Image: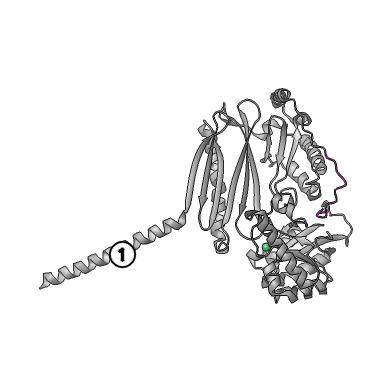
Amino acid sequence: MKSAKAKKTYRILLILGLFILGYFIFVMLQSNASASDRYERTVDLSKYPGVDLVTEITETKKYNMAIHYPIFKSDKINREIEGYASSVKDDFLAMVEEDKEFLKDRAAVLSLAMEIHPVVENVYSIVFSEGSYVAGANAQQKTKAYIVDANKSQFIQKTEILKDTKQNREQLYELLNKKFKESKEYSPLLFEDELKIWVADPNNKFNGMYFTDKEAVFKFDKYEVTAGAAGMPSISIPLDEMQKYLTDEWKEKLQIANDKNDKTDDINNNTQGNNKPKGEKPVKDDVDSSKGDKRVALTFDDGPHPKNTLKILDLLDKYDAKATFFMLGNRVDFYPEIVKEIADQGHELGNHTWNHKDLTTLSKVEGIKEVERTNQAIKSAAGRESTAFRPPYGAVNKQVQSAISSPAVFWTIDTLDWKSRNPDAILNIVQENIRDGSIILMHDIHATTVEAVEPILKYLKNEGYKFVSVSEL
Ligand code: NI
């Protein structure tokens, strides 16, 4: 009797055990399938002897990564470069983890692209461009350049090539400043004082700087010395203009390479008649500028919102401030009377596409449709057209831009209001970054942003700022 009872108990326990085991196997298979929907790593030969190229593609529900880096014959070089590539990945994945609750509608993206430029025999510049978008409005863009001697398995520091003296740095600043000013594209976006600080900083080892066999190239991170609209600006200086900044050893090495190629591509388009409507004013160090003629553009994205936008309109009215509202077509459609109110109070109407798609992921036709449809909705609601356009995520390419008549408007101060949801934090970011000509990015869909608006208006008014639309700026 007893043993039959025990047998029965064992059988029940066994079945139960199998169930539990089966459940765990099921859960493991599930999580494996969603953790990595696609992972590919390929290694290809490059056109340079002794350099192979690695491409890693990872696609999951939450993020997509495309990573490119070179492999040399030298372990020492490979360790450093692979270490850099994995730190870029790790930083990105940490951000994805931090912001994962915001990643329901749109996967985060990381791309680490790479270029190789031969400098002199066996010496290459390896130039990385990192672009990442996790959540919110801002896409990050960073750069890093290595110069390697593949034969000697060595990295060459930029300060071994550049004569690193205080006087030299001062002159280098003058030269870079001049080159920025000569560039039609970057000149209106340069922060001269930040460039000056950047060059003079003894900790600056010229991370993004590299050489080709014809020129020295200074590549900067987004926001490092320019407004965000410049992306990652890159200033090329022909080697013959660089002579006096080079150490004797490298002057000789590079001169030989330069003679061999004997080619000068001087990019001297000194254009003052640059009257693109987008033109921001060159932002100067404004410590001594007289109070009252400084200007700032407040911009509100992703609305209109039936309550919050109206509250903001009241506050703007109280401070006699004009702002710009970059609105989503589908919301305009829903709240046309709010759009009419914005227009009637004299604010600028901005187009932020129909439903916040990344335009760079659409075809040209689809992209135009997103923008055009929104223009129509704004016009029928407000009785006048939108006069400014801001691409979602700041993502725009030449193809999209060429199809849209208004220039893309970006921002110089990202308040991160969508993330902090904290009026004090929003005000703080403004206080720390404000300067004449700033464009401040906020979102009128959040109640916490509304709470930050009055303190910001009060603070900036006291600092002598006038509130204008982005087009006026
Ligand atoms: Ni937006």
Q: Position of residue 234 (x, y in %)?
A: 72, 42
User: Is residue 424 depicted above or below 284 in this figure?
Assistant: below
Q: Is residue 1 left or right of residue 396?
A: left
Q: Is residue 177 left or right of residue 449?
A: right
Q: Position of residue 128 (x, y in %)?
A: 62, 42
Q: Residue at x 84, y 71 (%)?
A: 320
| Quadrant including the N terminus | bottom left
Residue lying farthest right? 290
Image quarter for ligand 1 equals bottom right
Q: Residues within 10 Å of mark 1 (few under 14, many from 20)?
A: few
Q: Residue at x 73, y 29 (%)?
A: 246
The residue wearing badge 1 is 20
Q: Which region shows up in magenta?
A: 269-280
Report if residue 311 is visible in the image. Answer: no
Taking the magenta stretch, the answer to whether it contains residue 274 is: yes
Q: Pick the residue in front: 471 or 161.
A: 471
* Residue 450 placement: quadrant: bottom right
| Quadrant including the C terminus | bottom right
Report if residue 146 is visible in the image. Answer: yes
What secondary structure do most residues of the magenta stretch adopt? loop
Q: Position of residue 144 (x, y in %)?
A: 64, 42
Q: Pick the residue in front: 171 or 254.
A: 254
